[in-house]
Amino acid sequence: MSIDRDTGHLFGQDHEDPAADCSHVIEVAFETGVDSLFSYLAPDVLWPVELGQRVEVPFGKGNRRQTGFCVGIEALVKGESSTAVFGRGRPAKLKTITKVVDPEPLLDSHLLALARWISSYYVCPLGQVLAAMVPGAVKRSAGAKTEQYVFLAVREGDVLSQIKGSKQSKIVALLDHRQAFDEASALSLQDVRDQVGCTAIPVKQLAVRQVVRIIGRTRLAAPPLPVQEPMPVESDITLNEDQEKALAHIGGDLNSDRFGVTVLHGVTDSGKTEVYIRAIRKVLERGQGAIVLLPEIALTTQTLQRFSSRFDDLAVMHSALTAAQRNFQWRRIRSGQARVVVGARSAVFAPLPSLGLVVVDEEHDASYKQDTVPRYHARDVAIKRSQLAGAHCLLGSATPCLETLHNCQGKGHFSLVSLPKRVNNLPLPAMRLVDLRQDPVVRSGKYLISEPLARHLQTVLDRKEQAMLLLNRRGYSHFVFCPSCKHTLHCRNCDVTLTFHKSRTLRANRLATVVGRHIEGGYAVCHYCLAQTLVPTNCPLCGTRLALIGLGSQRLEEEIASRFSQARVARFDSDSMAPNDYNTVLRDFAQGRIDVLAGTQMLAKGLHFPNVTLVGIISADTSLYVPDFRANERTFQLICQVAGRAGRSEKQGTVFVQTFLPDQPAIRFALTNDFEGFVREEIQHRQACHLPPFWRLTLVTLRDPSYPKLEAAAQKWRERIDLTLVADNLCAKIRGPMPAAISRIQRYHRIQIVVQTPDSATMQRLFASLRAQEPIRPAVQAAIDVDPVHLL
């Protein structure tokens, strides 16, 4: 019988004594939402089973086959009946595992320890953490092919003399001539067929007579990665004084052979990537490996181009790879063939045998936070993995997050190093404010681009230079509105307005339904449930012509094309391209085949184009309207990051910041590039409100199609939290239950509870106690987000 580690639920077993030939008991974690571990007997015929291997076991009353990870092993006391071990001491009959799935463990001891930490810290079942750490392509051996090989099993005797067929004789002669006498020297069956000129039938006939043996070998093909245009080898780069100091500091920590975290605070184009490369070289010289994390796939392309010219043993891990590519890259890393790994968030779990350095570029970026279970933050997981491996962690950013800066002041293993100047002493771009309240063209709604920005853009185009225009909102218009009766187009599944998107293909005739004719060449989309609907030309309630209010990157692209007809324009957002299109657009822009790149916040992340002399921020205050305590920080970071794309060569760069809120502190500090001033002001508000980095935050979001049921469950959650705080004598502030900022998504009502504690230990004790208690009834879906990056 299997036993539920936490609840003790038993499942029937018919064996009289399944432990008769079993010397070990293992703990298994399943890749499901069940927050328990299960004990199973391991038959001696299947032994050894190692930690990190997957096993197939019977589960539940129906004994259906389930695959799980082995996460614990204990020897069974000889002569005693099987007992529930692992410190529980309750006698019980256990079921036995039926199969060992993997020939070797998929996770080593460091990664297993990391998985346990993630499970505990982020309040997530261990099995789901393990499932996220190993790519699905690896677990199903994507791209692996089994080929048949043949060798001579009999080399003399009557059997050979009785072979009469010419094809069979040639096969035996070929194997004998090539000395294929065992598995190691076996020849490919296809090769034998080609040389003898036969089908597989004569070979199989020889195998039946046991003259030859046919074996299978699994071969992993090497699928090519997307073609990367190589960059010139940068062997003659000379570090400036600030870079030398930073590298010396990092090198000292690496040589100390102890865990540490270095925060590299460098302005945009200060040469942080070159410091990363030199630090990785030092790690490779020590015989260790390095992981480099990037926030976006688009960034991975440029970084790979640069890193591939400096490192031969490079591997890449991100979601744009095919399954076969992911499996092949993972296997290369695991075997030690690749010692430098570049990738997005999940690359933090790369199975490097000897880890010496983890680099987190643009460490402030919200993309490092996983929005599904397990809801980990890759930056914090990178720090923890470095600690477990005794490695060094390097966090780089032009605008470090406040939590990271706070750690530098209060934690001994954190240190801060600055790169205050651009490489070659290039000046920072000139910042120009455009007060949209005083711009009649934009206020009228006719254009998104103000007159000052339009004039400068024309000048840049005349000089054959390039520009980037940022508008951090997708689509064409985010508000379909009736000016007469005030009706707006809402999603029927979510409590949000629909965003209008123009279609690339126009219909021959406008469609008509019961609500009238619809706008040609477009549709409305919900960005939360992805539902689409046609947009009527006239209001279905009063018949007035509907208006498209608001702005989006699609509308910006259209305006540039119409106002600057000579410009070659491309849009850079998730709506306009598939993952494989990023390489093409960035390559064309780098080679001058695109003049203006218009897009969302993806433009702000570490891209380097020397011919870009103008950056325009179309609406700098967009994110300020989001009801979130990080809105100011996110606005400041976005302005500074995208501004840093301009003037990265001898050509002077200019940045236009358009806003309706010119006196807002985040915008004001960003215009003067006053990072310290922004931090001083923002940190006061955070401390006064008991917000991160001073207090820890966890967001509990409950959802259910039935609002009465959800409301009752939310109240039970609050009562359970309050009782636990009193019972364990814990200090915390609890806000809610209250409706979420978006109160309904995909027809699920949403209620939130915000938990604030003065430190991480208190938060962990609270949720460990809640986790150990009986499930809350009525049961609704609950998402626990520790250290959330937003409160939506």
Image (cartoon, rainbow, N blue to C red):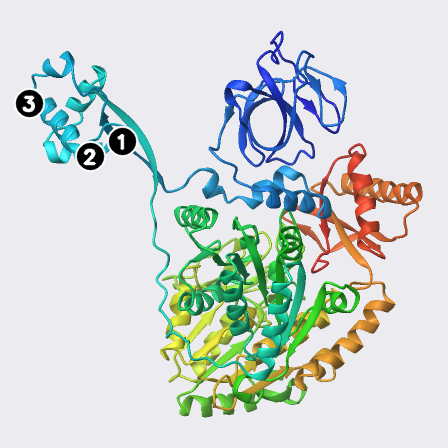
For the C terminus, the quadrant is: bottom right
Task: Indicate the amino acid at tag 1.
Answer: Gln
- Graded by Cα atoms within 10 Å as few (under 14), some (14 to 19) or many (20 or more), the crowding at tag 3 reads few
User: Which residue has dot 3 on it?
Assistant: 166
Checking the image for residue 190, the label placed there is 2
Secondary structure found at label 2: helix
Q: Could you tell whether 32 is left or right of 603 in the image?
A: right
Q: CA distance from mark 1 to mark 3?
A: 22 Å
Task: Indicate the amino acid at tag 3.
Answer: Ser
709, above or below 57, in the image: below
Front-lying residue, 459 or 738: 459
Q: How many numbered marks have been drawn onto this rendered protein structure?
A: 3
Q: Quadrant of residue 345?
A: bottom right
C-beta proximity under 8 Å, tags 1 and 2: yes
43, above or below 663, in the image: above
Q: Is residue 530 visible?
A: no
Q: Position of residue 100 (x, y in %)?
A: 50, 27
Residue visible at 37% across and 73% down in the picture: 588
Q: Position of residue 332 (x, y in %)?
A: 43, 49
Secondary structure found at label 1: strand
N-term-proximal mark, 3 vs 2: 3
Q: Position of residue 164 (x, y in %)?
A: 7, 16
Residue visible at 67% across and 58% down in the picture: 259
Q: CA distance from mark 3 to mark 2?
A: 18 Å
